[in-house]
Amino acid sequence: MNRRVEANHALETAAAYANRLKLPLLVYEGLTCSYPYASDRFHTFLLEGVPETARRLARRGAGYVFHLRRRLADPDRALYSLAEHAALVVTDDYPTFITRRHNARVPAKIGIPYLAVDSSCVVPMRLFEKKEYGAYTLRPKLHRILAQHLHPVETVPLRVEWTGSTSPLHTEVTESNLATLVAECEIDHSVKPSISYRGGRLAAEAQLRHFLANKLRCYAEDRNEPAAHATSNLSPWLHFGHISSLEVALAAQLAAAENGFGAAEFLEELIVRRELAFNHALHATDAEALSNIPNWAQETLRKHDTDRRDPVYTREEFEHAETHDALWNVCQKELLLRGKIHGYYRMYWGKKTIEWSATHQDALSTMIYLHDRYALDGRDPNTYTNILWCFGLHDRPWQERPIFGMTRFMSLEGMKRKTGVDAYLREIAHLEVAGKDPFAL
């Protein structure tokens, strides 16, 4: 899940064990065609990072095998084949998607030590041994120990350089053959690459530099105004591990200190809110289920689940942005085109999906489906936590009303009062016509 050479606790753990055992280090990265909703969008974003990963690992003296499984009929044993020649395996500790299942079943099959390391959070998620009720319960616990973890990851020099031959499992990825590789894969070719975001470490570093230089100073004031483009937009690269929240946090702290403004609001979102999502996913049996929301929310939604809805849209109508609400439609179109929705408008998008779905479970299933299929930052602890927030997770009771019960309600009138809806409508309309994003780096 963390596909980078820098600030990677799992990689440095592997390097330390390699040195201890006086062995070289081989890094394996796989991309299969069989993961849920595999598409041109996700494959392209991941493959765009491979050439730079290969270059940086070579400079460190590590070996690298990137294996692209193109067809469902192709063997799916690359990891096991490599593990037959290894002393141990180090991988990512990650609480959702296929990684959670993978880590549960692989160790028994390989017969060597298998270590899962948290390289996704600033403070390791397993230090918090129970599910937190909300940010207000996690925040003080996290801040008590944050200083122990908020420092750069030490790079471990490799004592034994990799000199092995290229593995037959390896797929060479270059900028020139990337599109061909994607086309050869048995995946959904109807979901096209994002028009806004390019994958890989270099793109992540450029996005971070742009945010620090131009947006961090106005983040606190403008983050909920989509037309201001004041957010970092780093979530796709954070999800795919091309950059770490730790190095982003350190860079934001330094930029704020050097330029005389604060970064507290940004760090609250990056650390407290993001790691609250990992806490939820870690301690939930099924991070996507309505059974995770608080008892008061479950009770109030049960009470109102049969309330009359008007209108009611099908999943296909939602997917194709065919509702009566222009703001909801452009939120969905942003997801289709860019591969993510601005965080504040995504809350509105979610609340209205609840209002116009036949049942609460239908609304949940629709939101998860749309993110799983289209969002570059989907299939992530933050995805499932933010969707369930729409149903009351990490929130409090509000005034009771139809359909929502005592869960929070959001209205179009409120969005118009608080944000520049018209500017956002024009921006997404331009994206749809032009097919390219003037805000993309």
Image: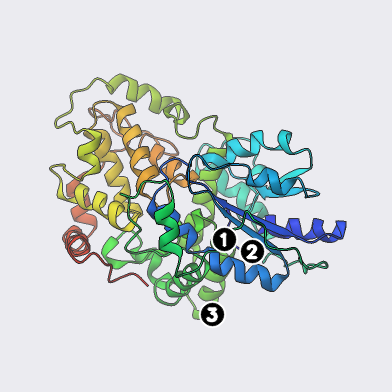
- Distance between mark 3 and mark 2 Cα atoms: 22 Å
From what the image shows, is residue 173 above or below residue 94?
A: below
Give the left or right position of residue 381, taking residue 231 as reference. right
Secondary structure category for the residue under label 3 = helix
Secondary structure category for the residue under label 1 = loop
Task: Residue type at mark 2: give it.
Answer: Ala
Mark with earlier residue (3, 1): 1
Secondary structure category for the residue under label 2 = loop
From what the image shows, is residue 30 above or below residue 219?
A: above
Q: Which residue is mark 3?
A: 258
Q: Which residue is mark 2?
A: 7
* Front residue (pair 338, 35): 35
- Distance between mark 2 and mark 1 Cα atoms: 7 Å
Q: Is residue 96 visible?
A: no
* Front residue (pair 128, 34): 34
Q: Quadrant of the C terminus?
A: bottom left
Where in the figure is residue 374, as x and y percent of width and height?
Answer: 35, 48
- Distance between mark 3 and mark 1 Cα atoms: 21 Å
Task: Residue type at mark 3: give it.
Answer: Glu
Q: Which residue is mark 1?
A: 244
* Quarter of the image where one finds residue 254: bottom right
Where in the figure is residue 320, as x and y percent of width and height?
Answer: 21, 44
Where in the figure is residue 364, as x and y percent of width and height?
Answer: 35, 33
Residue at image position (33%, 25%) is: 301
Residue at image position (45%, 39%) is: 394
* Front residue (pair 284, 276): 284
Give the left or right position of residue 252, taking residue 166 as reference. left
Q: Are marks 2 and 1 in contact (CB under 8 Å)?
A: yes
Give the left or right position of residue 298, taking residue 74 as reference. left
Which circle, 3 or 1, is nearer the viewer? 1
